[in-house]
Amino acid sequence: MRKLLVLLLVCLFLTGCHGSRSREMFVMPDRFDDSRTYNITFWAKNDTNKNQTAVYKQAIEDFEKLYPNIKVHMKLYTDYGKIYNDVITNIGTNTTPNVAITYPDHIAAYLEGQNTVVSLDELMVDEEYGLNGSALKFDSPSKDEIVPAFLEEGIIQNHQYALPYMRSTEALYINKDLVEKLGYSIPDVITWDWIWEVSEVATKKNADGRM
């Protein structure tokens, strides 16, 4: 099961059909123009999870109070596959989102086109508006505060295309009594080989067909 959920930026200016894929390259602006209005489209999953939806809405409300000239328009989906399909479909109609929550392999598919996804490399290190930038109106994490392994999963073709602001939690639960009854102890570092070995022993049947 794929676990990583990441954030990516998709170019606003897309031209041509899904086959031609010739688009304008993103150019880092010299400054943030707070005199104009920006409209940001954000596609996310969880229209059935009311708690998560409330988190999104509150975050958007708080953000727009800090930046009243930026309007965030959220579209919610029931699963990530539908987000992927809509991004792929909308590449040819200039209606892809500016921001979306997705999987790394989906981003890799978007990158088959030219300039369909913006690299975050230059944006992340901007002294004013990058990670932990001096001009930001909110408390942004620095790169050092992000789990390196999670950050690396957003690197594709040697460029950072995603940030792990939302990620599934992976956990392992072990029935200690059963493991010890089978003659095993739980090692400090769990490996797949150990799991397979214990699992095979646990599923062996006696001559009478019982476990």
Image: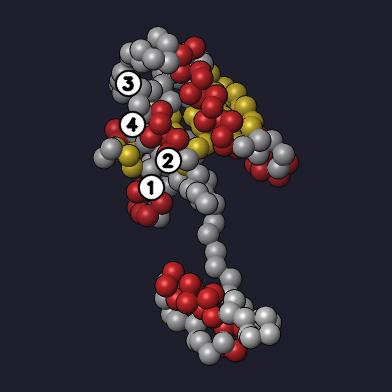
Q: Mark 1 or mark 4, which is nearer the start of the sequence?
A: 4
Q: Mark 1 or mark 3, which is nearer the start of the sequence?
A: 3
Q: Mark 2 or mark 3, which is nearer the start of the sequence?
A: 2
Quadrant of res 208:
bottom right
User: In the depicted view, which residue is nearer to us: 90 or 58?
Assistant: 90
The residue under the point 58% across, 71% down is 173
The answer to whether residue 168 is seen in the rendering is yes
Q: Nearer the viewer, mark 2 or mark 4?
A: 2
Disc 3 marks which residue?
114
**Crowd class of label 2 (few under 14; some 14 to 19; many from 20; radius 10 Å):** many
Disc 4 marks which residue?
119
Image height of 66 relative to 4, above or below = above
Q: Mark 4 or mark 3, which is nearer the start of the sequence?
A: 3
**Crowd class of label 1 (few under 14; some 14 to 19; many from 20; radius 10 Å):** some
Q: Mark 1 or mark 2, which is nearer the start of the sequence?
A: 2
The residue under the point 63% across, 85% down is 206
- Provide residue 159's location: percent of width, then percent of height: 29, 37
Disc 2 marks which residue?
104
Structural distance between the alpha carbons of marks 3 and 2: 17 Å
User: In the depicted view, which residue is nearer to us: 74 or 109?
Assistant: 109
Disc 1 marks which residue?
153
Quadrant of res 191:
bottom left
Image height of 120 relative to 2, above or below = above
